[in-house]
Image (spheres, helix red, strand yellow):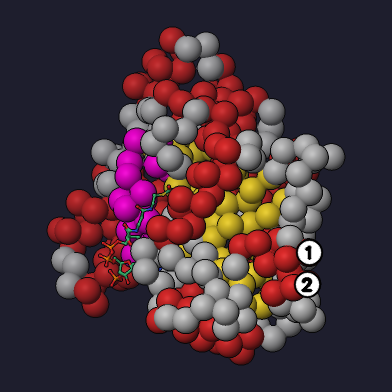
Amino acid sequence: MDLLQHMTERARSLQRCVVLPEGNEPRTLRAANRILGEGLAKVILIGNADEINALAAADGLEAIAQAQIVDPADKAVIDRYAPVLLELRKSKGMTEEQAAKTAADPLYLGCLMVKTGDAYCMVAGAENTTGDVLRAAFQVIKTRPGIDVVSGAFIMIMPEGVDYGTDGIMIFADCAVVPNPDARQLAQIAVSSAETARKIAGIEPRVAMLSYSTKGSGKGDQVDKVVEATRLAHEMDPCVDLDGELQADAAIVPVVAAKKAPGSEVAGKANVLVFPSLEVGNIAYKLVQRIAGAQAVGPVLQGLAAPVNDLSRGASWEDIYKTIIMTCNQ
Ligand code: ACO
């Protein structure tokens, strides 16, 4: 059984409740219809019921009848969630009036439903920008204990015959969130990525902290940052197999590793690649996806206190369907 099939079966047995703030967005509705039709999760759609039902009827999406629809224009909804938001944000100067207005924003409302346990997880971003989805999640869901930086990983599934990682599965991070992580943030990204490898991809992590230098071969502030991040990550989680600084070839090619990093437990067989900046991570995952033909599942937002995932605005309805399944597994 491949990873996606495995996650699908797991979602079916978990029966989690996902809130979709972009409830009247056509690709999202189609994905929700399939999730409901296949019995993979419970679904809450945020939006106007008449509008959603009309769109579903026009597209023949019969399973949408099983979704719960929550309308942000409903006063009872805002009366329930605005006080929760006010409590979370009053120390930042939010007023009662601002809380009522912000709670009616579907992205905040979705996060508030997760925060209160009315939904288990949230998927959004088919229409909204990454920044808008992330900001709502940061402010409402916040980070989990011991982590103060949220990052975004991709599960990279290599095409048949390409056996890097573990059975062709690798984790790449951060590819989505933190533009210029410092050493401490990079260490947290590494520890969170190891957990994503274990808990979501089902592989035992071997984490490479990537750089343009292997074990002192190159010099510079960017190398020093990765060396320090490696030290801090070891401190944060001494049980994770993690090594750095490593160049990409030393991280994944055994013969290169034998020359450049002899004796390393990780070099040559890394399955989690931690990039030194968002710029590198984002470019790298897109190139591997396009040139090598790998499937890129994600970004999986890691470090949040509850599962929320952001979609690309170019996502197809099938991408949204897969992201919902993955989020229900988090
Ligand atoms: N982890 C946890 N909390 C964070 C993080 C983070 N990485 N970044 C910001 N926050 C918190 C702040 O502490 C702040 O909390 P507070 O309001 O309680 O004080 C809140 O979020 C808002 O902070 P801002 O500084 O206003 O947020 P900012 O405007 O910097 O936005 C954002 C953060 C949107 C994540 C920004 O860093 C960003 O744009 N990152 C790049 C996103 C992107 O474009 N990715 C590439 C495309 S995605 C793809 O291709 C898959």
Q: Where in the image, quadrant-wise, is ligand 1 located? A: bottom left
Asked whether the residues under the numbered discs 1 and 2 touch, taking CB atoms below 8 Å apart as contact, a structural biologist would say: yes
Secondary element type, mark 1: helix
**CB at disc 2 and ligand 1 closer than 8 Å:** no
Q: Residue at x 66, y 78 (%)?
A: 243
Residue 163 position (above or below residue 44): below
**CB at disc 1 and ligand 1 closer than 8 Å:** no
Q: Amino acid at mark 1?
A: Pro
Residue 252 in view (yes/no): yes
Does the segment drawn in magenta span residue 58? Answer: no
Q: Which residues are magenta?
A: 124-140
Residue 204 pos. (x, y %): 77, 65
Mark 2, other Cα within 10 Å: few <14 / some 14–19 / many ≥20: some
Q: From the viewer's perspective, is 125 left or right of 212?
A: left
Residue 232 position (above or below residue 145): below
Quarter of the image where the N terminus is located: top right
Secondary element type, mark 2: helix
Q: From the viewer's perspective, is 127 left or right of 230?
A: left
Residue with the mark numbered 2: 258
Residue 153 pos. (x, y %): 55, 57
Quarter of the rendering containing residue 256: bottom right
Residue 275 pos. (x, y %): 52, 65
Residue 202 position (above or below residue 52): below
Does the segment drawn in magenta span residue 126? Answer: yes
Instruction: Report how many numbered discs are placed on residues in the image.
Output: 2
Q: Residue at x 57, y 29 (%)?
A: 318
CA distance for labels 1 and 2 = 6 Å
Quarter of the image where the C terminus is located: bottom right
Q: Amino acid at mark 2?
A: Ala
The numbered dot on residue 254 is: 1
The numbered dot on residue 114 is: none
